Amino acid sequence: VVSPPQHVMDGPAHIQPPSVKSNRLKQGAKELNFSLPSAHRETKGEAKSFVLSRLDRKISHRLPLEAMTKNVQVTKKVVPKFKVGQAVKLCKLTFHYDPPVESCKLTPYFLIEDKDGNLRPRDKDDDVKFQWSRGQRCVCIVCGKRATMQCMSSLKANLKPEDTFVCSYECMQINFKRIKKKLDEILAKVPTKSWDTDPSLEGVKCGLDTTKEVKANTLSCRLPPVFKDAWELVDTKRSYVPKKHDEGRRLKLEASVATSKSQIWRTLFTSPVMKAPSPPPIRRMLISDQEPTGTTFRVACFNVLAEIYATGYMYPYCPLWALEWSYRAQRILDQLLTYRAHIICLQEVQANQFKSFFLPKLSAEGFDGVFKRKTRESRSNDPDAVDGCAIFFDRKRFALRERHDIDFNQIAEMHFHDPQILRRMFKGNIAQILVLEELSNPSRGQICVANTHIYWDPEFKDVKLWQTFVLLQHLQRDLQHQKLPLILCGDFNSETSSAVYQFLSENALRPDHPIMKDENTKNVLQYESAIEHQLPLQSAYSVIGEPKFTNYTGHYIGTLDYIWFTHDVLRVVAVLEIDDEEVLRKHTALPSPQFPSDHLMLMSEFEWANVR
């Protein structure tokens, strides 16, 4: 099915529900001088009326509990299949954005007109053909930006066409000063072209008129001949990803649908292809008090922002082309390979993109990886368009020895029997636990690595605390008999002042904490005698001070991501610095043309504490 045009695709009916991070939407908006659309202003009552995850929000809350908690498909009324009329021509051809950008996929949207004059989406039987062509390079000879003007003097002097383009009057003046001497020499030797036509002479084309005398050193016309672009066929697929060679060139798309009588081609032109923005500035490793004395290893934690959540509705300040997965994916990969951590923990990785992008790309760079998807149903035609967590590790440094997955839905089903509590607890979140063996130094033995993505909604603090508590109980049970060091990464969706952070850092939650007075918390934790754990955990960034933010959007700014470790066995050597706020504000907030996610990547370098 062909996607509708831009003005339809951007509408609320085709995007994630407005409840996503709804309670954070207004936070930080004034500080960023950014106005959120009225559709973002959702009341707390509306947010509380939905008990399922954000992907399940369209399901009616009147459905049976079994259908809501066990992902049982509800029988729907069978609608007779609409009879598709024979295609006559292709119409409403448009792009999502223009100008195109290097390395960002460009996909046309269109409708089909049938023999009865009805407009419909593309059917599987429609034979639609595409032809992509690129024109001549058209960028400013001075600064390299997209050109908007052409120097007539340079053309008359027979300079190369690509050397005659400029982007502004300022660049034209700079260029003219550069080539003035050269132009004087050329125009003094070679008779200039005549573009001065006589309107009374019918049939005489511009540039061919020889009826008037032209002085050698003067420009005698107002307009040159029509500049004809030379088109080169580059692709015949529906979508096209502009390459570096396309920079500064216009693209032409010809599309048609074959009919029994003829084949009518529709043509669509773009502006010259823009150069891809520069990558973010390289971040330094901030060294701790003591220099490393032994072998170290680096651990990265990164919420990559799944494609299903990266919509123009959620991030209206970000250009649509910068939200395209084809563009963001390469930027995410570049970041991962720039800092080259030995263990990489990712959140919001879609199942289909783990298979098609992350696994093959990182495998080619020497990494092995495992993935666990959230227990939610896909909201698109692709059943694998569901996000989850992934852990990659350098196969030269580590080998996988054990793997355990935690499904919080299954655990909730075993612990709770009250339907209301189950509705509140079923959010589809998961966690991963791997046991890796270090190959470079076998005497160090094994290390446990955990990765999780805790539920996001601020109205469900009890769910966040319960999920974290369950995860720590499992880690404590699995590590007790093996006595393994632990690295715990994740997007905990909890600030440093939260109950989750206190529970992790202080080994217990104080009974007088405000969350313990909440009725939902009492119901969720009614069977637990104490909210505590025995793992000596510390946040890696707490060594130099927790960052002010790891999530920086138009509706929320704060710290949500952490790398925890057992400080009795491991020691922090260095941590990756956080980008300066001025850099992030350059494009209002994240994501942006420079930053592919709404989260910042964290990384810490560790060594074994007992090497001293």
Image (cartoon, rainbow, N blue to C red):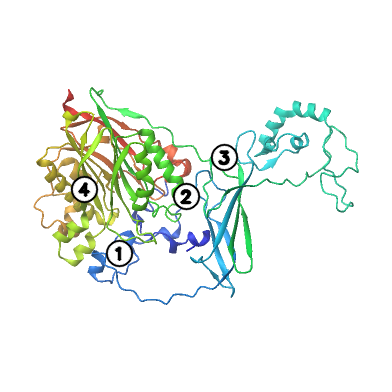
Q: Residues within 10 Å of mark 4 (few under 14, many from 20)?
A: many
Q: Residues within 10 Å of mark 1 (few under 14, many from 20)?
A: some
Q: Give the secondary structure at mark 2.
A: loop
Asked whether residue 110 is in view, the answer is yes
Residue 166 occupies quadrant: top right
Please report contact status of discs 1 and 2: CB closer than 8 Å, yes or no: no
- Type of amino acid under label 4: Ala
Q: Give the secondary structure at mark 1.
A: loop
Label whose residue precedes the other's in the sequence (3 or 4): 3
Left/right placement of residue 272 relative to residue 175 reads left
Q: Residues within 10 Å of mark 3 (few under 14, many from 20)?
A: few
- Relative height, residue 425 to residue 28 (above, below): below
**Where is residue 606 drawn, in percent x and y?**
24, 31
- Type of amino acid under label 1: Phe
Label whose residue precedes the other's in the sequence (1 or 2): 1
Name the residue: 55% across, 52% down: 236
**Circle 3 residue:** 245
**Circle 1 residue:** 50
Asked whether residue 598 is in view, the answer is no
**Circle 2 residue:** 317
Which residue is most to the front?
260
**Mark 2 or 4, closer to the camera:** 2
